[in-house]
Amino acid sequence: MSVDVFDLLATSVLLLNGKGTVESANSAAEDMFGLSRRQLCGRPAASLFDRSSGLQSSIEQACLGRFADLRQLTSLRRGSDTVEVTVTTVALTDQPWPVLLEVREIEPRVLADRSQRLLDEVEGHRELLRNLAHEVKNPLGGLRGAAQLLEAELPDASLTEYTQVIISEADRLQALVDRLTAPQRVPLNTRPVNIHEICERVCALIQAEFRQSIELVRDYDASVPEIPGDSARLIQALLNVARNAAQELARQPAPGGSRITLRTRVARQVMLAHRQHRLALAVAVIDNGAGVPDSLRERIFHPLVTGRVGGTGLGLSLAQDFVQQHGGIIEFESQPGHTEFRLMLPMEPA
């Protein structure tokens, strides 16, 4: 197959050698990356993308001929812009190049539709929780009150052990209901906040809790300005996401060492909560763990859904709620060795 044939395609194509290095690129790829063919050739292909660890693994597997093709979501930097793309890794046979990468930019409409579906889904569960809380709180109060009256009438003080169990369990359920409904009751305390101060606070808390078992990496964009937000809720949202990653790594350490990366970037022309934002802040929590199980992917932000023994299933749900109160959303993508949760926040006041 001639390289010139690929120049007729509107899709960006990179042809790689057995080491995963770009040997040729078509004209569309030059436009996609904002680099000339000469600048692209000789570079490790994975280095052209922001989230490259999973892609590097795919390229290595393709070089070994272990699959025909694999499609992944990632992003790349084009000048000062971050561009969301899909990359299809194709293993070639009987060709001078063992691997072909096809890169397509994701249309803003597709991203907006995906975000809107998630927003609608979370709002539906939030309404269900409000109704559930209303139905549960009254019977709980009656149950607790009856147990207290019963305790006062017991002839044997040793029997109060049983009524105390009823009272303590009623209190535990009441606290759970309060945690589920609390985010909607208190208005935001919005002021200009420095996102990197929030990231550093979260890093300090994670380090204190997990000591040296997890390596923390900072990848900050120093040009990010202050954004309007409630500092306490943003800390809690980011902490919930980071702690969730740390707990999974503690339960199942990554080969070669567990690592969490906090990354900040500015995204442009992002649709959030029915509004087109010229600028948005993307705060990513990236870990190198085993990834989100397939059985949880569609329900990861649902309340009371957890894949961890002893987990409440509230951490990610509350984090999503706090970010949505700021007019943003939390997105994620996951595969073994690379799981990324992105807090997308508008950079201008609502």
Image (cartoon, grey):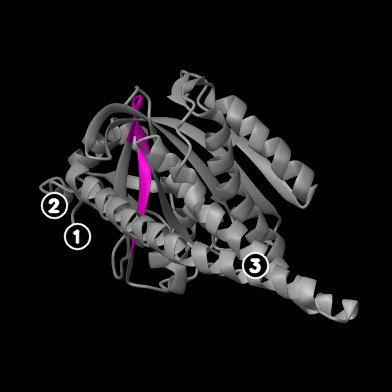
* Front of the two marks 3 and 1: 3
Query: Where in the figure is residue 349, as x and y percent of width and height?
Result: 35, 22
Find the distance from the CA under tag 3 to the CA under tag 1: 77 Å
Question: Are the residues tagged 3 and 1 within 8 Å (C-beta)?
Answer: no
Residue 343 is situated, as x and y percent measured from the top left of the image, at 44, 41
Which badge, 2 or 3, is on the more N-terminal residue? 2
Q: Quadrant of the C terminus?
A: top left
Front-lying residue, 189 or 135: 135
From the viewer's side, name the closer residue of 181 and 193. Answer: 181
Question: Would you say the residues marked 2 and 1 are in contact, meaning their CB atoms lie under 8 Å apart?
Answer: yes
Please give the name of the residue rendered at 49% of the width and 70% of the height, measured from the top-left corner: 293
Which residue does the numbered mark 2 point to in the structure image?
Answer: 5
Badge 1 is on which residue? 1
Q: Which contiguous range is marked in magenta?
A: 71-82
* Secondary structure beneath label 3: helix
Give the residue type that dot 3 points to. Answer: Arg
Q: Which mark is residue 144?
A: 3
Query: Quick one: which residue is furthest to the left in this view?
Result: 8
Q: Which label sits in the foreground, 2 or 3? A: 3
